[in-house]
Image: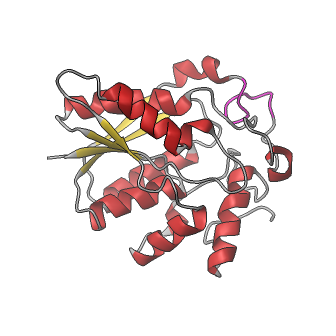
Amino acid sequence: MSDCVAIVSGGMDSVTLLHYLVKVAKRRPAVISFSYGQKHIKEVSLAQENAAILECTDHLLCDISTMQDLFQTSALVAKDLNVPTIDAVQGDSQPITYVPNRNMIFLALAAAYAESHDATEVFYGAQRHDLYGYWDTTPDFLSRLNDVFALNRKTAIRIEAPFVNYSKADILRQGLEIGVDYSKTWSCYEGLSLACGICPTCAERLAAFTEIGIADPIPYDRH
């Protein structure tokens, strides 16, 4: 029986989190992944693969793609907006890759999923972005959101983000220690067969592998 919920996209951070919960924290997470109209849907199949590897049989793929019209200011969703390079977003407090209120929506749905499992904790892979950032991955966001969820009169859900103060390289180190296969993760914001190597999340991922001193195992078009 599941004892918590983990939001897993199939990217480096959330996959590492899932492996951490199962292998280190000895938890039994119910997994939830979201299809919201994103260009990089390849991640979802990798979320499913990692859940299967870890024998997390309770995995909900939540299709909210009908909500994609809410997210048309984001280059991750809107077909007429190009995904920017890392150089274009550095110094931008709310880059075009930001999906409006996405984490709030995901966490609200994951909290409902947790309640239906009589679980009181939801884990998500928020991290410290060194090259760019979003307001809904910060410790302040986490703290204030937990104040809201604590108002629940019966099942008070707590949102946990163990990597919220970790850099991408810190997460990579943790994952390598516990045997995460990073060839089974995907980070690129573009919805292509090869990772672009130049979008913000590719840049951050490649910088982490460079810092650790090993090659990224996924295929890149250019970098």
Magenta stretch, main secondary structure, is: loop
Residue 123 place in picture, x, y as percent: 37, 46
Residue 99 falls in image quadrant: top right
Q: Residue at x 31, y 58 (%)?
A: 21
Between 31 and 158, the one lying in front of the other is 158
- The reply to whether residue 78 is in sight is yes
Tell me which segment is drawn in magenta. 73-81
Residue 220 place in picture, x, y as percent: 72, 64
Looking at the image, residue 206 sits to the left or right of residue 138; the answer is right
Residue 135 place in picture, x, y as percent: 61, 37
Q: Residue at x 59, y 62 (%)?
A: 168
Q: Is residue 211 above or below residue 62?
A: below
Residue at the extreme bottom of the image, as rendered: 213
Q: Residue at x 49, y 29 (%)?
A: 104
Q: Residue at x 43, y 46 (%)?
A: 124
The way the protein has been coloured in the rendering is secondary structure
Q: Is residue 25 above or below residue 8?
A: below
- The reply to whether residue 109 is in sight is no
Residue 118 falls in image quadrant: top left
Quadrant of the frame with the C terminus: bottom right
Residue 142 place in picture, x, y as percent: 45, 39
Indicate whether residue 80 is drawn in magenta: yes
Q: Is residue 74 above or below residue 200?
A: above
Residue at the extreme right of the image, as rendered: 88
